[in-house]
Image (spheres, helix red, strand yellow):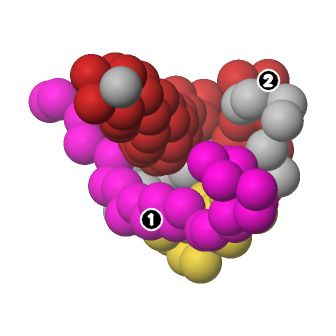
Amino acid sequence: MKESYWGMFVVMLGMTAISFIYFFQTVSNTDEQNYLLLKEITEAAMYDAVDLAAYRATGSVRIDREKFVENFVRRFAESVTLGNTYVIKIYDVQETPPKVSLQISTKAKSNVTDKVIEFDIVNRLDAILETPY
């Protein structure tokens, strides 16, 4: 009888460990995916928003604010997970020198126990477009 209690204890401990691993893996994947999407999409949207007419005329690199926002939102919407709700906050877009500051937040949900746990994942990025001479 004593060995059966130990067997039940080991099985319950294993199930608890697997549920915690699943919970933290979900949180880590969401945070990492948001950060990498934010970084890559910001860079691509900044390159798309470069004003080529101003570059050809004066040689200075500048971006178009409206074009950047349009490209960023379109690319981000194409790439995100549909199960989450995202909030995009664009704090600053400077045209010359090209600089953007933005933040993406999402609410992640998980149910390890009977309760649904909900928390915010926030990623913030300040990016400056560098171009080789």
Q: Residue furthest left?
A: 133
Residue 91 in the figure: left or right of residue 109: left
x then y, percent, for residue 78: 79, 23
x then y, percent, for residue 65: 68, 58
Q: Residue furthest front?
A: 1
9 lies above or below 117: above
The amino acid on which the numbered mark 2 sits, given as a three-letter code, is Glu
Please state, as top left, top right, bottom left or bottom right, where the C terminus lies in the image: top left
- Residue at x-position 17% and y-position 29%: 132
Magenta stretch: give its range.
109-133
x then y, percent, for residue 34: 53, 42
Specify which label sits upstream in the sequence, 1 or 2: 2
The amino acid on which the numbered mark 1 sits, given as a three-letter code, is Arg
- Say whether residue 113 is magenta: yes
30 lies above or below 40: below
| Residue on which disc 2 sits | 78
- Residue at x-position 61% and y-position 60%: 104
- Residue at x-position 27% and y-position 22%: 3
- Say whether residue 129 is magenta: yes
| Residue on which disc 1 sits | 124
